[in-house]
Amino acid sequence: MGYYEIKIKVSAEAQEALFEGLTGIGCLGMVEEAGEIIAYFSDNLGIDSIRSGMESVKKNIRESGLDGEISYDFLFLAERDWNETWKKKFQPIDVGQNLTIIPPWMEKKEGRMNLIIDPGMAFGTGHHETTKACLSFIEKIAKGERKESCLDVGTGTGILAIGASMLGYGQILGVDIDPLAIDAANRNIGLNNLTNITIKEGTISVTEGVYDLITANLMSEILIRIAPELAARLNMGCHALLSGMITGQEPEVIKEMEACGLHLLESFTDGRWVTLIMEKG
Ligand code: SAH
């Protein structure tokens, strides 16, 4: 058996839709590298079916009004090369002051807080700028705040929930609408031997109560849509960490959140993605 590696060029706004589309057509894993998405497929699927899958993903993206300018190249890899290639993509990533994200097959880095994340199909391997920004902000916020509870909306691999747990948050709930993310998050929680994180399938609507920290690394449209519920789930004086917006989209997110009783404390941009810390009250 062999694998196909596909290098895909896609606009920032269509990236999330591309991830979803690729998962839907049987992609085994994907990473972002030097501004491109690298996706892996088993050759059992056959190149014709992968190609037509890619075309239908492109068509869906275009029809949903997003920038559908997507180009891609195929490369065939023999099985042994795939394992090596895939594993090589996942070197330890140092984030913030004290965190390191490592894949399960690697030795823990001494003197660091090691987050073990199995890079499977769910989004959130730590390679994405927004994930890294969120983790460093959780590290920063965790220094001074009440830390009884944390809600992670759109948990993906569970990476932010796992980070929050390691940084001292007590009870943590992660939610995601994607069943694959639920499996991945539960697996990663097990790999890190953590017992204070619960994962639930669904949107923020399946949650209740109030939390000392809410993390949400989601597209701006979703952040805007969930603003009232997000504000309602946040404890007074506590922080919401919002990411996943592309530069230029944040004013609308801030406006919606402000209308729900939050105010902006800090914002960070790497030129393309924006991360916000907002406070309730
Ligand atoms: N928290 C991770 C993953 C972010 S990717 C990280 O920071 O790296 C966004 C995730 O949100 C995806 O796993 C997607 O399935 C999920 N998602 C998208 N819309 C959602 C919604 N309305 N409610 C809950 N999860 C959602």
Image (cartoon, rainbow, N blue to C red):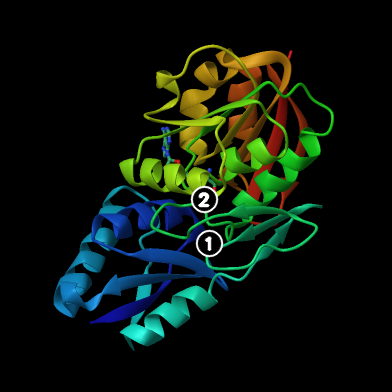
- Residue at image x 40%, y 57%? 67
Counting every numbered tag in the picture gives: 2
Sequence-wise first label, 1 or 2: 1
- Residue at image x 25%, y 61%? 26
* Residue position for label 1: 104
Residue 191 numbered mark, or none: 2
Is 241 left or right of 122, judged from the image as shown?
A: right
Residue 147 location, quadrant: top right
Q: Amino acid at mark 1?
A: Pro
Residue 50 location, quadrant: bottom left
Q: Is residue 104 visible?
A: yes
- Residue at image x 61%, y 71%? 91
Q: Amino acid at mark 2?
A: Leu
In the image, residue 36 above or below residue 202: below
Residue 124 numbered mark, or none: none
Residue 15: percent from left, percent from top: 44, 57
Residue 268: percent from left, percent from top: 74, 46
Q: Quadrant of the C terminus?
A: top right
